[in-house]
Amino acid sequence: MKAIRKVLVGVASVSAFGALLVWAGQPRFSCEAEPVKVEYGDTLWAIAERNCDGEISFVVDFLVNQYGATIHSGQLVWLPLDYADTKSWGE
């Protein structure tokens, strides 16, 4: 009986998590369309925070994938306009 209960609780948990993912949908953010010139001391997080609204952590993850963890003064950083834009960069 305990084994069945554990299985049912596990199935219910997985189902609830799946429903949450469907409900939550895509990360919501929007960023400026112009490239950003990196200033001395800038971080990708600071750039995203200044130029984007919404789920900044998703933007930062995207930028790290595009530019790596190190950026340099004078470098131009292009921000994704929105979630759909992140999908077109790999094409």
Image (cartoon, helix red, strand yellow):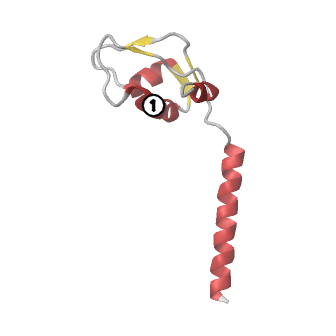
Residue found at x 60% / y 25%: 88
Residue found at x 67% / y 81%: 5
Q: Position of residue 19 (x, y in %)?
A: 71, 54
Q: Which residue is mark 1?
A: 60
Within the image, what quadrant is residue 18 found in?
Answer: bottom right
Disc 1 is placed on an element classified as helix
Using the image as rendered, state which of residue 83 and residue 45 is in the foreground: 83
Identify residue type, mark 1.
Answer: Val
Using the image as rendered, state which of residue 47 and residue 73 is in the foreground: 73
Number of numbered labels in the structure image: 1
Using the image as rendered, state which of residue 46 and residue 71 is in the foreground: 71
Quadrant (top left, top right, bottom left, bottom right) of the C terminus: top right
30 relative to 51 in the view: left or right: right
Image height check: is 73 above or below 8? above
18 relative to 46 in the view: left or right: right
Within the image, what quadrant is residue 44 found in?
Answer: top left
